[in-house]
Amino acid sequence: MVAAETIMTALDAGGYRVTSPRRRIAQLIAEMQGRFTADQLLSASRRHRYGIGRATVFRSLDVFSALDLVERVDLPSGEHAYLACEPAHHHHVVCSRCGQAVGVPEGELGELTAALREVSRRTRYQIDSHRLELYGICPDCQAASADQNPTTATLS
Amino acid sequence: MVAAETIMTALDAGGYRVTSPRRRIAQLIAEMQGRFTADQLLSASRRHRYGIGRATVFRSLDVFSALDLVERVDLPSGEHAYLACEPAHHHHVVCSRCGQAVGVPEGELGELTAALREVSRRTRYQIDSHRLELYGICPDCQAASADQNPTTATLS
DNA sequence: ATTTTTGCAAACCTTTTGCATGGAA
DNA sequence: TTCCATGCAAAAGGTTTGCAAAAAT
């Protein structure tokens, strides 16, 4: 969970203007659970009757992700989803049923970096970035499916 | 590198019809180096003056990937790329400059599964799939950039 | 006063779909 | 002969862009 004001501060520090649409979008993001798409953000904004245009939502997400306030993940469906992220978490586990996401503490994937070094040595590729996405069923959904059928995922 | 005939055999075994467009697309894929997009495949097909439609390229890629002959990866740009893959390799290292890809032998990421188990225990998520993409510079491009400036990547 | 940001609408791009035709089994 | 597969063109997503008006510094 990121505080909206954190985003405002970062905007200012980054030399971006602190505007009302950005403030409102930041607010909406702070209220989001798990991952969300630009479209969901737009819908939320419309429910609140903010007069924010589609383009502004996309442009704000670009700015926020340039500031590492939000992480953009590429969904197989071709659309993009975003995760509000605390700085330091570089990976997430996403529930493939409800979309709720939790951060993975950096230390827990320590073995990964060792593995990458090995791959780098063997392939002779100079590996400088990686993308790891974990998918599974969150505790809530596991409990839910204990006595009822799996429902359709929120987001393909 | 997959042989086009391997694809034909798999098609047949999978109960799909062996058609001329599919044969030609398989041939083109066999000639591809590293990753490629549906559009690149379509262009190649046009250069050869095969009369293959856009839809058929997409539909063939769907079939091939259902048969695990090709792996679909989601690019940040929103388009999809494909990798011809030998069965057994489940990860790839992709050159972010030229797009050339090599498979990562399963065993080398053994530490990863241990790490996932740990994440699963801590988060209580039932992790059932993951996606790992490694990016770096391939040996050729490293050599090339030793005495000249980095060129623009083939594929964003 | 300047420069960034916004909203709107249209443009873009990749991928998908409907449907009549053509080809495989 | 019976389905499956193809091509075409149009539709459908999600995302981006041009531009004049509005807001921030």
Image (cartoon, coloured by chain):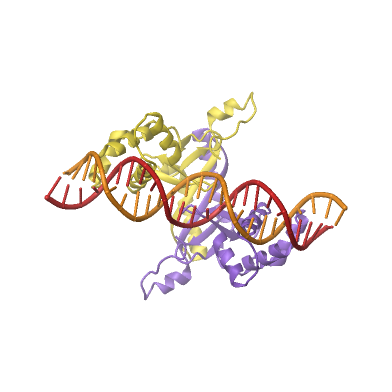
Chain colours: A yellow, B purple, C red, D orange
Give the x, y percent position of residue B8. 73, 62
Q: Report the label total.
A: 0
Name the residue located 37 percent from the left edge and 33 percent from the top edge: A28
Q: Tell which residue pokes out farthest to the top in this image.
A: A147
Q: Is residue A114 visible?
A: yes
Q: Residue at x 52, y 48 (%)?
A: A78
Q: Where B51 falls versus D18 (above or below)?
A: below
Quarter of the image with the N terminus of chain A is top left
Quarter of the image that includes the C terminus of chain A: top right
Q: For this rendering, which residue is in front, A30 or B62?
A: B62
Give B51 or A59, whichever is nearer the viewer. B51
Image point (71%, 64%), residue name: B6
**Would residue A75 appear left or right of A12 to someone viewing this image?**
right
Q: Is residue A107 above or below residue B60?
A: above
Image position of B2 (left or right of A69) = right
Is residue A90 at all visible to an observer of this figure?
Answer: no
Q: Residue furthest bottom?
A: B147
